[in-house]
Image (cartoon, rainbow, N blue to C red):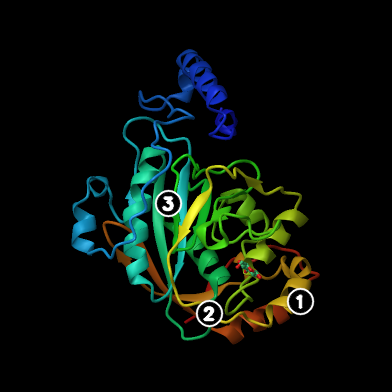
Amino acid sequence: MENLCEIDYINKKMAKELDKIYSVVSNVFKNDVSSGESLCPCMPSLKGRLAIDTTPKYWSDIRKEDFSIHLKNGHFWQTQCRARQHLAIIIPFRDRESHLKIFLNHIHPILQRQLHNYGIYVVEQANNDEFNRGALINIGYLEAIKDHSDYSCVIFHDVDMLPEDDRNLYNCLDHPKHLTVLINKSNYRLYYRTYFGGAGAIKSDVFEEINGMSNSFYGWGGEDDDLYNRLKSHGYKILRSSKVSRYTMLNHTEADAAPSRFNLLRMGTRRSKYDGLNSLRYKLLSTKRDKLYTKFRVTFKKSNIRRTIRYKRKSQKKNKPQKAKTFK
Ligand code: BGC
């Protein structure tokens, strides 16, 4: 039944037909309806193009908004109907509090209108090394599934990307979906054919199958290209629904691109077996439970990640999957 929703939202006619069929079918097969609620429609009532509010916000004002009423620890359970998917939204983070406020104020109402169950996890890098977006997303995923083991869909999301249209559905399909296709900064053109940065949706089992993201990319660039390559090498296509996938990027100072990314990318798919979820070594310093989000403050050591990779390379013969470890 889930697959019935695997249509582009802009095929409105088809979506409406599917919803009609679905409501008939779900009445016949009552086992698809839990605790008396019927499954949410494929096509919820949405607004379309949205106004983008980038003015600075106060936490106290955001908490007073209607969308905050039913939030707990950044988690929302749909009450109108049974949500089709449970989304773990993972935001790699450091020093961007003003962006986080604008982002949360914008994204919560969209996710609620789209009728999802979801949790928002901010994963803050506490160590002073260059930013490691891949490792933060991996840690966010592992900690999120400790929180709720039934997350079916992982959405990685940069904190500075604001969707301009709520018909851009935040859900997971059988193949990974790129969300941030057209960005104001690139004059609403796709950066390049294989671009998979910004935000994307990957089924949890697919994310595990590809061993998550690489932990080796420190500094700006490359980790999203590596993720694209991992997915392709496992036979996945990247889906895009370009007409509605429009984003405003918040202004920020751009980091220098890391020169090491080209070498890492070259060996990426070969390294993917032992560089990812199974090689993470990190320490969870604190967990902050806020109404609007859950924040994990984490640290990891550069040398540890590299050493783990060298070790794995030597012991490649052992193909038993390893669990992520935290270090003391
Ligand atoms: C980098 C990516 C980045 C993209 C768009 C590429 O050169 O490797 O990480 O997302 O540019 O800025």
| Disc 3: residue Cβ within 8 A of ligand 1's nearest atom | no
For marks 1 and 2 on the same chain, the one whose residue lies earlier in the sequence: 2
Instruction: Give ligand 1's quarter of the image.
Output: bottom right
Name the residue tied to disc 2: 255
Looking at the picture, which amino acid does disc 2 mark? Ala
Which residue sits at x=53%, y=27%?
12
Q: How far apart are marks 1 and 3 (CA)?
A: 32 Å
| Disc 2: residue Cβ within 8 A of ligand 1's nearest atom | no
Q: Can residue 74 be seen in this view?
A: no
In the displayed orientation, state which residue is furthest to the right. 317
Looking at the picture, which amino acid does disc 3 mark? His
Neighbour tally class for label 2: few under 14, some 14-19, many 20 plus, Cα within 10 Å: few
Which residue sits at x=59%, y=43%?
241
Neighbour tally class for label 1: few under 14, some 14-19, many 20 plus, Cα within 10 Å: some
Of tags 2 and 3, the one toward the viewer is 2
**Residue 212 vs residue 262: left or right?**
left
Q: How far apart are marks 2 and 3 (CA)?
A: 34 Å
Q: Is residue 169 visible?
A: yes
Rendered-image quadrant of the N terminus: top right
Q: In this view, does 2 lie above or below 100?
A: above
Q: Is residue 154 above or below residue 283?
A: above
The x and y percentages for residue 314 are 78, 79
Name the residue tied to disc 3: 148
The x and y percentages for residue 290 are 27, 61
Q: What element carries label 3?
A: loop
Q: Is mark 2 on a helix, strand or loop?
A: loop
In this view, the residue in front, 197 or 288, is 197
Q: Is mark 1 on a helix, strand or loop?
A: helix
Q: Residue 313 carries which label?
A: 1
**Residue 136 vs residue 242: left or right?**
left
For marks 1 and 3 on the same chain, the one whose residue lies earlier in the sequence: 3
